[in-house]
Amino acid sequence: MTHSIHGRQRWLALIVLCLGVLMIVLDTTIVNVALPSIAADLGFTETSLVWVVNAYMLTFGGFLLLGGRLGDLYGHRKLFLGGITLFTLASLACGMANSQILLVGARAVQGLGGAVVSAVSLSLIMNLFTESGERAKAMGVYGFVCAGGGSIGVLLGGLLTNLLSWHWIFLVNLPIGVAVYAACVALLPAARGHAHGERLDVAGAVTVTASLMLAVYAVVNANEAGWTSAQTLGLLFAALVLLAAFLVIEARVQHPLMPLGLFRLRNVAIANVTAVLWAAAMFAWFFISALYLQRVLGYRPLQVGLAFLPSNLIMAFFSLGLSARVVMRFGLRRPLAAGLLMAACALAWFARAPVGGSFVPDVLPGMILLGVGAGIAFNPMLLAAMSDVDPADSGLASGIVNTSFMMGGALGLAVLASLAAARSDALQAAGSATAALNSGYHVAFALGAIFAAAAGILGGLLLRPGQPGQPGGAGAHGVPVSSEPARATGDEATTENY
C-alpha cells in the first residue's frame, strides 16, 4: 500500500532500512576472515569449523519465504523490528560465546533474524517509494548495499580481527541494531499487514521451509560428504519431495503461502531465474577471487579487503545515481542485459589470471568491470522481480527473490568450488600446488562467466522491457505499479503497508 510519510523523512527511512540490511549482508562474509582465529580460540576442527558459516546459511535460506509472507500478513514494520531485535541479540550471544555449541547455535538464530529482515525490507522500500523515478533511485541504494556489502565485510572483518579480536565482528552489530530499531520506531508508522483477514498457510510454511533447509544443508555439506554420496542425494531427494508437496498444497489451499499464479507474471518469473544464475556467478567471483588473492598471490586478509575497494566504489557510483537514470532512460531489459554481460567479461578476465600475476594488469580490470556491471544490473533486476506484484504480495515477492539469490548463490558456489577442487586435485601430482590451485580457480571463473552471460541473454531476450520513465512495467491489472499507488479502503490507504 501507500505510505503516510513524505519527502525527506522517506529518504531517512531508506537509510535506516538499508543499515539494517547492511548488517545482514556483512554477516555473510565478515566471519570468513576471522575463522582461523575462531578455530584457535574455541578449538574447532577443520570439519566442525564450517558450521560457523553453515548454521547461518541454513536458517537464513530456510526462512526467507516464510518471513516475507509473515510480513504481508502481520505487518512489514512489525516483522522488520522483530528480525532486527532477534539478530542483534544473537550477535551479542555470538560475541560473548565461549564454546563451540553456543557460537553455532547463536549463528543459527542470527540467520533466522537475518532472513526476516531481508525478506521484508525490500517490501518496505518498494512501498515507501511509489513514484517511478524515486523508486529507481531507492532501488539503486538498496542494490548497492546488497552487492557491495559482502566486499565491505571482508575489509571490516580483517580490520576488527587484526586490531581487536574476532568477538568484535559480532559485537559491532549491537550499536547498529539498537540505532536501527529506534530510528524505525520513530520514522515508520505502525499498522496492520496487507493481507489481514487471511490465515497463515501452516502446511505450506512447514513443507517449503523444511524443503529449503534440507536443500541448503545438502549443498553446503556436499563438498565434504561427496556430491554423489547417499547423504547428499538423499537430502536433495527429500527436499524435492517436500517441494512437490508444497506445490500441491498451494494449488488447493484457500489462502496459499505462495500464490502459484504469481509466476504467470513474466517479469517475476524471468527475474527470479536470472537472479539464480547471477547469484551463482557473483558468489563464485567473490569467494574464488578472494582465495586467488590469498592463496596464489599471497595477499593478507586486509589486503584482500582493499583489493575489493575499486569494485565497491564503482558500484556505489552506479547504484546510487547513474543506474536509476539508466533505468529511467532505457527501461529494465537493456540495462540488465548490459550489466550482466559486463560481469561475464569480468569473470572471463579472472579466468586467465596467472600464478605470478600483479594487481593492476590481472585483478584491477576485472574488479572495474564487475563493479560497473553489478552497479548497472542489480537495480533493474530487483525492480523486475517486484514491479508486477500486487502490494498485498510484496513481502512474498521480496522473500522469493531473496530466496532465489540465496539458493542460487549457495548452489552455484558449492558446485563451482567442488569443480575447482577436483581440477586442482587432478593437477596436484603433476606440478606445483599453487599452479594446480590456480587452474582450479580458472575453471570456477570460466563457469561463473557462463552463468552471468546466460543470465544476461535470458533477461535481454525474455524480460518485458517496460517504458522509459516507468521501470516498474505493468502490474497484475495492467496498471503501472511504480507510478500509481495501490488502492485501499478508508484510512488504510495511508498506513496499511506498515
Image (cartoon, helix red, strand yellow):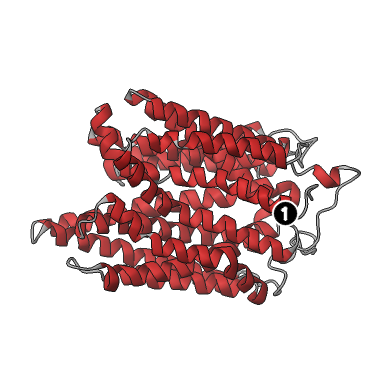
Position of residue 332 measured from the top left corner of the image (x, y, whole percent): 62, 70
Mark 1 surroundings: few (<14), some (14-19) or many (≥20) residues within 10 A: few
Q: Is residue 322 visible?
A: yes
- What residue appears at the point 25 percent right and 69 percent down from the top-left corner? 353
Position of residue 182 measured from the top left corner of the image (x, y, whole percent): 64, 35
Which residue is most to the right? Answer: 490
Position of residue 214 measured from the top left corner of the image (x, y, whole percent): 45, 38
Count of numbered tags? 1
Residue 428, quarter of picture:
bottom left
Residue 443, quarter of picture:
bottom left
- What residue appears at the point 45 percent right and 37 percent down from the top-left corner? 172
- What residue appears at the point 72 percent right and 50 percent down from the top-left corner? 9
Which residue is most to the front? Answer: 163
Position of residue 230 measured from the top left corner of the image (x, y, whole percent): 32, 39
Residue 30, quarter of picture:
top left
Q: Amino acid at mark 1?
A: Arg
Q: In the structure shown, which secondary structural element does the residue marked by tag 1 occupy?
A: helix
Q: Is residue 204 visible?
A: no
Which residue is most to the left? Answer: 430
Give the labeled residue for mark 1. 8
| 138 relative position to 47: left or right | right
| 111 relative position to 69: left or right | left
Look at the image and tell me in which quarter the C terminus lies: top right
Asked whether 185 or 427 is in front, the reply is 185
